[in-house]
Amino acid sequence: MILLKNGTFIDWNSLQFLRKDILVKDGLDENIIFDPTPEDSIGAVTLDCQGNFITKSFACGHHHVYSALARGMPAPRKNPENFNEILEYIWWNLDKALDLDMIRSSALATALACARNGITFVIDHHASPNAVLGSLDTIAKAFDQVGVGHLLCYEITDRDGMTKAEQGLAETESYLGNNQGLIGLHASFTVGYETLRKAVNLAERTKSGIHVHVAEATSDQEHCIANYGMRVIERFAEAGALQFPNTILGHCLHLNDHERGLVAGSPAWVVQNMESNLNNSVGFFNSKGLGNRIMLGTDGMHSDMLRSAKSAFFAGHNFDLIDYMESYRRFRNVHNYLSTNNYMGDGANNLVVMDYNSPTPLNTNNFLGHFLFGLESQQVKHVISSGKLIVKDTVAQNVNEQEILQEARNQAVRLWEKMK
């Protein structure tokens, strides 16, 4: 147990401010107790949070662990001229070079970065065509080691042949036998009829859902129309992929009004990744007609959800219907996705303590202004995941940060050599 004393608690739903001591119970999805009695607190580790703000920790709706070792890598052999070439010459070149040691290092580095930035739960979408089997367990163990909750999937695709597609299906089914997770698909333009059918059937059998990139670029729609005579969302709807309340549709940039209506009329969720869209020059997210089930991700660009929320807000001014409250709602909607679908690991005893020494008053009425223009991940002081302290005074508690980063640098050199 952990006792947080003298801090100010901000309820993530109501934004109510409470000046109370908090007892954080240890265990998966346990509760917190306000102003506990001395008897309740026997044996608890005490943290003085004087001048600090305490609130629910953060979660990421769409990440890519496999991109962790990409930072600073050599330029591709050809300068990409469109989104498909970005995939071909950068990301598909990278993911083919991954082995389990690189994946483990990527996952540890990602989990560490998430924890340091106040993220205690990650929904990840993984790809490693030449190291499929065992990849999800490798990522899960790394996240568990750091203390970050997770909902994983493998990116099933036909782009490397049907044998690799079958391996992706097998890895997914094996992992879901003992773990919570999703059925990952790359995108419509690399997933044929048979693989899509098998993925939806697997989701039905395992009571899971689909996690897939949707219309991230116009080329996805063009391919779907040319090969299937329909648009991407129409194809996924016809295949049954939208029937699941835990299905996640990534990006959803280039949808027409009919497709937006299909998404809004389904129980599926949309995840927005603004910075990735800007980086790839594929367009701007517009929530019009998509409904309220929209959450935020990073798409592997980084592990900072406060940064993602600001990007969605600022870039959305001219392209989206988004205001202060909507940016915060999308930032927090991942918690609603997880609780609605009864996923474990994002309970009330996941908290972040922030050392935010504002030059102006902070209260319920102006919190959203501070959220967008004041709060930064560098202010994260302590992080509690499932009642356990995983970051204390900005230092990771379960792992050696320098060892993880040095190993990541070593694995990055190996990866870059293989990519040549």
Image (cartoon, rainbow, N blue to C red):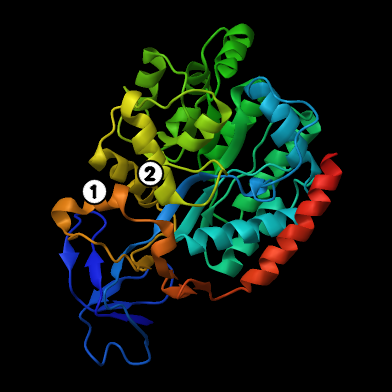
Q: Is residue 122 visible?
A: yes
411 vs 189, left or right, is right
Which residue in the protein does label 1 denote? 369
Q: Residue at x 70, y 58 (%)?
A: 104
Whether tag 2 and tag 1 are in contact, CB under 8 A, the answer is no
- Return the x and y of residue 29 as percentages of the image width and height: 39, 66
Side of 33 where 355 appears, left or right:
right
Given residues 191 and 277, the one toward you in this image is: 277
Foreground: 149 or 400? Answer: 400
Is 394 or 244 nearer to us in this picture?
A: 394
SS state under label 2: helix
Q: Where is 321 relative to 105, above or below?
A: above
Going from N to C along the chain, the mark reached first, 2 or 1, is 2
Q: Residues within 10 Å of mark 1 (few under 14, many from 20)?
A: few
Residue 178 in view, yes or no? no
The amino acid type, in three-letter code, at marker 2 is: Ala
User: Distance between the Cα atoms at labels 2 and 1?
Assistant: 12 Å
